Image (tube, rainbow, N blue to C red):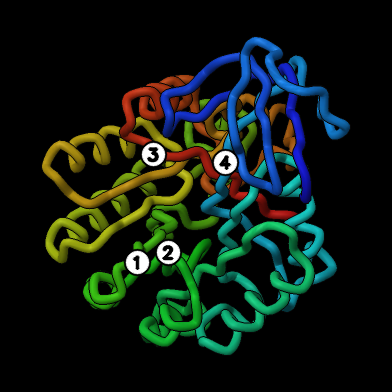
Amino acid sequence: MSGELLIKGGRIIDPSQNLDTTGDLLVNNGVIIDIINNNDYEPLDNVIDASGMIVSPGFIDLHCHLRQPGFEQKETIETGSRAAAKGGFTTICCMPNTSPAIDSASVAAHIIKLASQYSDIRVIPIGCISKNRHGKELAPMMELLHAGVCAFSDDGHPVLSSNLMLRAMEYALLTGLPIVEHCEDLEISAEGQMNEGYLSDKLGLPGIPTIAEEIHVGRDIKLAEYTGAHLHIAHVSTSGSVEIIRQAKTRGVKVTAEVTPHHLTLTEEAVGDYDTNAKVSPPLRTLHDVEALIEGVKDGTIDIIATDHAPH
């Protein structure tokens, strides 16, 4: 935007500046010039009334699904980035569960090119850990690094092989990029449909116990501790996982974690009378888990809230 712009009367929040104040923000040619609290400025033609609104740096979403290439009937880079911009997000990181998967430099470059053509915000792809997300053979991680990915993940497919994950972390350490892991022991979760407990028994649905997540979190943290790699744990859902991560951080393990808005605000009770809108992965847990997740955000055990935006 060219010329001067006044964003007037908003609540200006910038954690990096320890700033939380109500005032007017003066912008010139897209650059913030000053914060004004006393109306001491010349009248401007370009004014946005931000009364009752929050003015802040753009949000970053570390975990979203744009579905392109391969599933454009669900979402595209254009529609997903427009929705993100509408919500205040200026950078989004898209997961590699596309078709073809983001397991080569050419696919990563294709996504970056599409984003440059169709997105007004920054879109950064996340590359695969393994070829086609099958968990059998490492993807070319150095090539993906040079193509512009920001992390490595097999997304909804947990890396079941401890040896493959060990090698992935060793390579990730060379790239300087994090491993983003969906932590789930598939032998334990099996055909589960919701959180395992009284409610799943009452509804007659196979359950997914909390230990299915926690045992995988523990394994990956030990591998990160051994290699020194940066491990980022996606969509944490249980109180036990929060505690394992908290203890790892006290030991100096390079581990970060995210939680989703729905795991912070909903419990398994949302399943209600077999409401499939509440069927998510990992499943919604108990009130005890929600309280532990909130406490984890407050004390810094959980580093960020990510949307896990996944249109179907």
Question: On residue 194, which mark appears?
Answer: 4
Q: From the viewer's perspective, is the residue at label 4 or at label 2 nearer?
A: 2
N-term mark: 1 or 4? 1
Q: Which residue is mark 3?
A: 303
Indicate which disc residue 268 carries.
none
Q: Nearer the N terminus, badge 3 or badge 1?
A: 1
How packed mark 1 is, by other alpha carbons closer than 10 Å (few <14, some 14-19, many 20 or more), is: some
Q: Is residue 205 above or below residue 272?
A: below
Structural distance between the alpha carbons of marks 4 and 2? 18 Å
**Extreme-top residue of the structure:** 38
User: Which residue is at the front of the view, 26 or 69?
Assistant: 26
Question: Residue sitting at 36 percent across and 28 percent down?
Answer: 296
Are the residues tagged 4 and 2 within 8 Å (C-beta)? no
Residue plotted at (35% across, 62% down): 178
For the residue labelled by badge 1, is the local secondary structure a helix, a strand or a loop?
loop
Which amino acid lies under the numbered mark 1 shown in the image of this protein? Leu
Residue shown at the point (68%, 79%) measured from the top left = 113
Q: Which residue is mark 1?
A: 177
Query: Mark 3 is on which residue type?
Result: Asp
Secondary structure beneath dot 2 equals loop
Is residue 9 among what the camera can see? yes
Mark 3: few/some/many CA within 10 Å (<14, 14-19, 20+): some
Amino acid carrying label 2: it is: Pro
In the visual, does 114 lie left or right of 182? right
- Classify 76 as above or below 90: below
Residue contact between numbered discs 3 and 1, judged by CB atoms under 8 Å: no
**Foreground disc of the pair 2, 3:** 3
